[in-house]
Amino acid sequence: MPLAPKKILIVEDEPDIAQLVKLYLEKEGFHTNIATSGVEALKLIKSDRPDLLILDLMLPEIDGIEVCKKIRTTPDTALLPIIMLTAKAEESDTIIGLELGADDYVTKPFSPKALVARVKALFRRLERTDDPKQSSFSFGPLVMDLSRHEVTVKGKEVSLTAKEFGLLEHLLRHPGRVLTRDVLLNAIWGYDYYGTTRTVDVHIRRLKIKIPVLNDAIISVKSLGYKLSDQVLDK
Ligand code: CA
């Protein structure tokens, strides 16, 4: 059975660029939609959920960073893949964009072909990692086996509380993705939990103490939450 075509929402207020991106993506079999402002984008994401967002940084009313932040802090859309479009002069904003949770970015002026390649690469990366049926994960020397409810580092078992275990599982399921404190709190403690998002910080700290490889790997993302980065494993 052929897979349904992926839907991509292009958020860009410059019509020429939006149309060009649309043309190239549709040539590759993607379905596309265009939003010309952040407000329109947020509406469309609710009414017709895309599989990926191409988000221009400079938008009228609310800019790309605000849109990105809004998406990441809403549990329903927290994991929506985002590629940000930025201009060279906005390089510091590019970094902010990634810190706020874009999965990748492309600098203007860009070649539409290169953008399409990034889109495909991101979908491939997500297909590898976003499998709800996956029951074992490894991260460097760390192995998590859900069926045995066991975490080992270099073969030695690490004792974790239920919440620490849940938190670690959530991070390992979504490597490289920014997970906000609210999203983590809802996923592990549940919506009816009375605690504060500080609870998440406390548990992250404990995980880092118990499993030293996570100390550099779990990155704090300014004002938002956390991200598991596998960059430490390459060193
Ligand atoms: Ca723009």
Image (cartoon, rainbow, N blue to C red):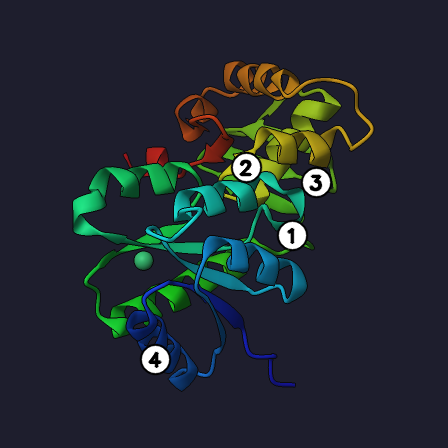
Q: Quadrant of ligand 1?
A: bottom left
User: Callout 2, which amino acid?
Assistant: Leu
Tell me the tag on residue 24: 4
- Between disc 3 and disc 1, whose residue precedes? 1
Residue 143 appearing in the image = yes
Q: Residue at x 27, y 72 (%)?
A: 112
Tell me the crowding category of disc 1: few under 14, some 14 to 19, or many 20 or more residues within 10 angstroms, Cα based.
Answer: few
Residue 146 numbered tag: 3
Q: Is mark 3 within 8 Å of ligand 1?
A: no
On residue 179, the disc is 2
For marks 3 and 4, the one nearer the N-term is 4
- Give the residue pinned by disc 1: 134
Which amino acid type is marked by label 4?
Answer: Tyr
Q: Residue at x 35, y 77 (%)?
A: 19
Mark 1, ligand 1, within 8 Å: the answer is no
Q: State if disc 2 and disc 1 touch (CB < 8 Å).
A: no
Q: Position of residue 172 (x, y in %)?
A: 56, 40
Judged by depth in the image, the label closer to the viewer, 2 or 4, is 4
What residue is at 32 percent from the left and 66 percent from the top? 14
Closer to the camera: disc 1 or disc 2? 2
Nearer mark to the viewer, of 4 and 1: 4
Q: Residues within 10 Å of mark 4 (few under 14, many from 20)?
A: some
Can you say whether 105 is above or below 96 in the image? below
